[in-house]
Structure formats: structure tokens, C-alpha cells
Amino acid sequence: MSTTPLPAQEPGRGSAIAVYVCYLLSIPSASLFALLGVIIALSAKDGSGPLARSHLSYQMRIWFTAFWWTIGFAILWGLGVLTAFLGIGFILIGMAWLGAGVLYIWFTVISLLGLLALLDNRPR
């Protein structure tokens, strides 16, 4: 039985793994680890190799996507609170909570898929 050796350690690969781990821990930490992860990704991108750079760029892109969607859901929730006395506000609040839940599940799944791709030496 033959085994293929692991590729040499690429600069920035450890940082990309750390960012994915932070992203996966973001829900139990109320997104504090996600913020830490994007800071790591921003600081590690310059000195990284091509594979790690593709993952770090991908990680920054998904964080900023989730950030802006979170802002949108917060605005929707705020509009729901302001219009709750009309009755429509409760629908808006429910939509905001449902959207945020789907967003956090998407963020976790996409982070897990990215981590698996990195461990398999595939770019993102």
C-alpha cells in the first residue's frame, strides 16, 4: 500500500486553517470569533502562498457578505420594531430572525466546506 506524501507547508496555510476554525466557532461566540478570523485573514494575506491566498481571499469575501447581510437584517428588525403597533412589524421581525438564522447556517456550512477544500489542497 502506497501513500502520497503531504505537500510542503505553504506560507499562510496555518492562518487559513485558524480563520476557518474561528468561523466555525463564531455562532457559539456571538460572532466574536468571526471578527477575530477576518482580522487574521486580513493580516496573513500578504505573505501567503497561492493556495492559502485563495482561501484567505475567500474567507474575507464570505465574512463581508455575512456582515452586510447582518446589517440588512438588523435594519429590517428595526423597521419591524418601529411598525409593531401596526401589526406588520411582527412579520418583519420574524423575517429578520429567519433570515439571520439562515445566514448563520450558510456561514457555518460554507466555512466547513472551505476548510475541507483547504485540507484537500483545493483552492477556493
Image: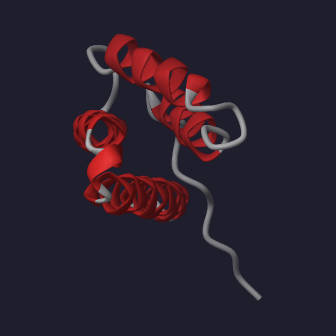
Q: Quadrant of the C terminus?
A: bottom left
Q: Position of residue 107 (x, y in %)?
A: 44, 54
Work out which residue is located at the far front of the displayed protein and give it: 85
| Rendering quarter of residue 45 | top left
Q: How is the image coloured?
A: secondary structure
Q: Position of residue 79 (x, y in %)?
A: 24, 39
Q: Nearer the viewer, residue 85 or 123?
A: 85
Q: Nearer the viewer, residue 9 or 123?
A: 123
Residue 122 position (above or below residue 28): below
Q: How many marks?
A: 0
Residue 116 appears in view = yes
Work out which residue is located at the far right of the displayed protein and give it: 1
Q: Nearer the viewer, residue 63 or 30?
A: 30
Q: Quadrant of the N terminus?
A: bottom right
| Rendering quarter of residue 11 | top left
Work out which residue is located at the far top of the displayed protein and give it: 43
Residue 118 appears in view = no
Q: Position of residue 116 (x, y in %)?
A: 53, 63
Q: Nearer the viewer, residue 112 or 46?
A: 112
Q: Residue at x 60, y 27 (%)?
A: 33
Residue 57 position (above or below residue 103): above
| Rendering quarter of residue 74 | top left
Q: Position of residue 13 (x, y in %)?
A: 49, 35
Q: Residue at x 42, y 15 (%)?
A: 39
Q: Residue at x 55, y 40 (%)?
A: 23
Residue 48 position (above or below residue 28): above
